[in-house]
Amino acid sequence: MEPLFDFLGSYWWLIFPIGGMAGGWARSWSKASEERHRRKVELLKLKNQLAVHEEANQAEVVSLIDAHDSVNHRWLDYELDVGNLIDFPLMTDVREPLTVAFLRAKKEADGLRPATPEEISTPARLAEYRAAVHSYELAFDVAEREARRIKDGNFSGPERQRLATARKLLRIAEDTAATPAERQTAYKRARKELDGLIVLPEATVAALESKIISMLDSRKDPDPDTDVRFA
């Protein structure tokens, strides 16, 4: 031990620079630890922000799907109700530019619609679907306003009379108080009155026939002249 004490006694002054160096190392280590902690905190914040952003995007996708459904339901009010199509024929008139624009916008939005909200996982995909839904909403609004403004104004007097007759016949075809023969005859006459005036979409015809099929006696094909309502 004596040599050690002799060394320390001779080089006691080294304590100060060594102590300073040790203190510097300690401070550097502490600073590095603080920096690592700060980075961890920032990383956690970033992860939380990304999670919130992703959740917000999914919420927007759900909202867009709801908006898409809303316009589809509004369209079904026409497509599945021949009475509405008779009252507002422009909604299915593909000669009208506004109708064509609406149907194209619908096709595009339907094509981009995700099966589930999670299917849209990139900002570009979200922006594409958002634009399609908004275009669909706008195109439908414009077409519907014009259809309700014009109504049957594009038809001549005799054509409007045929539309009015078709409305009455369809009411009879759906009237449970009428006989099966009367309902069947009314339905056929209504289709004849509409022929050349309004092109009914397949979905419209299917919905109408499914609505009254239980009332129609498909085994009978009565002569229209025997129907006392239209004699």
Image (cartoon, rainbow, N blue to C red):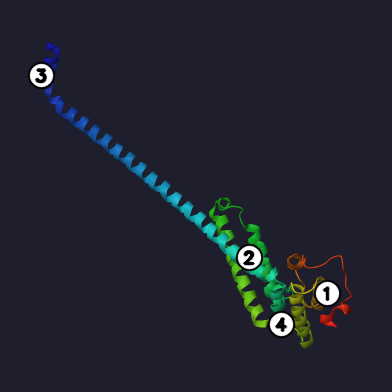
As drawn, 54 above or below 141: above
- Earlier residue among tags 1 and 2: 2
Q: Position of residue 93 (x, y in %)?
A: 73, 74
- Earlier residue among tags 3 and 4: 3
Q: Nearer the viewer, mark 2 or mark 3?
A: 2
As drawn, 214 above or below 172: above
As drawn, 8 above or below 35: above
Indicate which disc residue 9 carries: 3
Q: On the image, numbered disc 2 is attached to which residue?
A: 72
Do the numbered discs 1 and 3 sit on residues whose CB atoms are within 8 Å? no
For residue 35, side relative to residue 105 (left or right): left
| Residue found at x 67% / y 82% | 150
Do the numbered discs 2 and 3 sit on residues whose CB atoms are within 8 Å? no
Q: Name the residue nearer the viewer: 168 or 33.
A: 168
Q: Nearer the viewer, mark 4 or mark 1?
A: 1
Q: Residue 160 appears in which quarter of the rendering?
A: bottom right
Q: Nearer the viewer, mark 1 or mark 2?
A: 1
Q: Residue 194 appears in which quarter of the rendering?
A: bottom right
| Residue found at x 78% / y 82% | 162
Q: Name the residue nearer the viewer: 108 or 180.
A: 180
Q: On the image, numbered disc 4 is attached to which residue?
A: 152
For the residue marked with disc 1, what is the amino acid? Answer: Thr
- Earlier residue among tags 4 and 2: 2
Q: On the image, numbered disc 1 is attached to which residue?
A: 185
Mark 3 burial class by Cα count in 10 Å: few <14, some 14-19, many 20+: few
Q: Position of residue 29 (x, y in %)?
A: 27, 34
